[in-house]
Amino acid sequence: MTSAAKFTKRYVLYTTIVALGVPLFFIADFYINGSSINSSGINDTVKTELTLPNFSLTTSENKPFTKASFLKEVSLVNFVFKSCPEACPLLMEQTRDAAQKSHEMFPHLKVVSITVDPNNDTIDELASWKQEFAPDNLNWTFVGGSKPAVESLIKSGFKMPVEESPDDSLGPILHSFKVAIVDHFGRIRGFYDVKTAKQRETLVSEFKVIAKEAQRTYPSH
């Protein structure tokens, strides 16, 4: 079985477990079905759904990462951990592909990878991971912190699940495989299941709309 096939199988099992066992983390069907929560609307805008709370985490450069770190830029955010054997590497590759395409339209793109295993993904581990993976032309930030702070942001801020796995075949940690767009005001504008080509295309298309909003708001940035 190929890595992609294994990822798809585990993704289906994962979403089933989460849908049955952790329903409070899903505030609408789009979290399970993988559809975007936003769509291009009147006046070339995308509907806003969620606003991030204040939080305090740390980057791989050992610098503070807060809600203010999202301001004035448009960010792609994923949730990963370094020891993840198959799903996370694929998610990172798909995020990188979408980011490269989006970066062509808006150079102030930021990519943010938040570890779901902060106890093991130390600052040094995150720095090593960034050096190995992030291309030089992308502003890619790897973020960790205390486990309570990370889990609070993921669950309460992004409304996404993160739990220790009840089944070792799924890996040690269950977490979302979606990529979020966070806009220049720190608002979550959509979630995208980037394992599908259609959702990657939707992400890039809707990123373009939000990037235009950011450029109108901060024309000299």
Image (cartoon, helix red, strand yellow):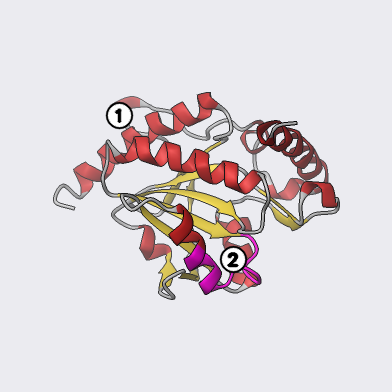
Q: Do tag 2 and tag 1 residues touch (Cβ < 8 Å)?
A: no
| Residue 103 percent coordinates (x, y) | 31, 41
Residue at 69%, 49% in the rendered image? 25
Q: CA distance from mark 2 to mark 1?
A: 33 Å
Image position of 83 (left or right of 163): left
Image position of 125 with respect to 141: above or below? below
Residue at 42%, 60% in the rendered image? 141
Tell me if residue 131 is in the magenta stretch: no
- Figure quadrant of the N terminus: top right
Mark 2 secondary-structure assignment:
helix
In this rendering, does residue 30 appear at all?
Answer: yes
**Could you say which is closer to the camera, residue 186 or residue 92?**
92
Q: Which residue is mark 1?
A: 44
Instruction: Tell me which amino acid carries mark 2.
Output: Val
Crowding near the residue tagged with mark 1, few <14, some 14–19, many ≥20 C-alpha atoms within 10 Å: few
Image position of 81 with respect to 92: above or below? below
| Residue 76 percent coordinates (x, y) | 44, 47
Residue at 66%, 33% in the rendered image? 4
Tell me if residue 118 is in the magenta stretch: yes
> Bounds of the magenta span?
116-128
Image position of 27 with respect to 149: above or below? above
Return the residue found at the far right.
167
Instruction: Tell me which amino acid carries mark 1.
Output: Asp
Image position of 171 (left or right of 89): right
What number is the disc on residue 150? Answer: 2
Crowding near the residue tagged with mark 2, few <14, some 14–19, many ≥20 C-alpha atoms within 10 Å: many
Quarter holding residue 35: top right
